[in-house]
Image (tube, rainbow, N blue to C red):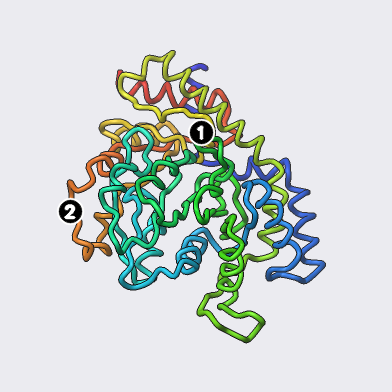
Amino acid sequence: MSKALSLELKVPLLDLKGQYAPIRQEIRDAMDRVCDSQYFIMGPEVAALETELARFCETRAAIGVSSGTDALLVALMALGVGPGDEVLTTPFSFFATAGVVARLGARAVFADIQPDTFNLDPEEVGSRVTSRTKAVLPVHLFGRCADTAAVARAAPGIPLIEDAAQAIGSRDGDGRSAGSVGAMGCFSFFPSKNLGAFGDGGMVVTNDDALAETLRILRVHGGKPKYYHHLVGGNFRLDALQAAILRVKLKYLPGWTEARRRNADRYRSLFASLGCEEWVRLPEDVPGHIYNQFVIQVVERDRVRQHLKDGGIETEIYYPVPLHLQTCFQNLGYREGDFPHAEAAARESLALPIYPELTEDQQTHVVTRLREFFA
């Protein structure tokens, strides 16, 4: 690639227009089907998506909800989490992971991450379990499954809720589908996810029939039959339009996942060929990783990001402030230095573009520009 071309090349963080263009008519047909039916809340489209996603995730049931955040919230509600309870989770995740715990009046208890996976460290989990621990909430961050088997051994008898918001279609070291291992698995269909809706949407999957029924009741204000309430739930329903769009996209998800994995392999080859591995720590590749993000670690991260931006390359920082240091969680009593691996990840992590439509020229431009910074 010539220097002149590289100066003109733009690399967005995500190209949803590129994803939409080849399936535009299918999406429009699905939306028209819903509009013609005038059935916008729940209904046959949501039921069909639930059947298809339960099959995809290898679980007995899937329950569509209004967002990934509400998936986590209703899952905790189904376990009866409330004041006086503790939920053990990671400090290196999107805010919703701990925010839903606080909303229920429970206490988020954090454990540090493994520096090579960004996921919850099972040994840290074992040292923080107490008699008040009501659930453990591991996160499959950036599309790589956490070691849920080891987490379960560290917290025997305590329900696991898998935060699989970034991990639909990923598999763990034993080949099990994300979301199928714990008591429940929670997914987000935010537009930037590997399977993204045209707005908010989420799903809870489970192999427990009793939990599935409780989730279905909770998402409609706790009412069954209609207007008769034995539980206090919420309005956590999935829109039919979003379900119809997701049903179209779900057919393409395996191919998109393979494209993301190919792009991850290409990044590794480019980094090796250009001699960048001395300065850049790449994400470890394991079977089953779906690369919702391709997150590297670099010193002088903020300067590196600006250098890439000046070259027309968009990046993102996931996440600049770990949860235990967020202002709203000051009452939990954590301090800087409590979770050094999570804090190092917050200082050094940088997500590069990894979407399926990314071209070889674009990836070469990304790595070449990084090499220029360290030259």
Can you identify the residue that label 1 sits on?
Answer: 10
At label 2, which amino acid type do we have? Arg
Outermost residue on the bottom side: it is 227
In the image, is 303 to the left or to the right of 200? Answer: left
Between 316 and 250, the residue placed more toward the observer is 250
Residue at 77% across, 66% down: 35
Q: Nearer the viewer, mark 1 or mark 2?
A: 2
Amino acid on which the number 1 mark rests in the picture: Lys
Q: To which quarter of the image does residue 258 belong?
A: top right
Residue, disc 2: 335
- The residue under the point 40% across, 41% down is 150
Residue 43 in the image: x percent, y percent? 73, 68
Is 337 above or below relative to 275? below
From the viewer's perspective, tell me whether residue 61 is left or right of residue 167. right
Neighbour tally class for label 2: few under 14, some 14-19, many 20 plus, Cα within 10 Å: few
Q: Earlier in the sequence, mark 1 or mark 2?
A: 1
State the residue at coordinates (56%, 60%): 200
Q: Residue 310, percent across and down?
A: 38, 34
Label 1 – label 2 distance at C-alpha = 40 Å
| Residue farthest along the front direction in this orientation | 157
Q: Which mark is residue 267?
A: none
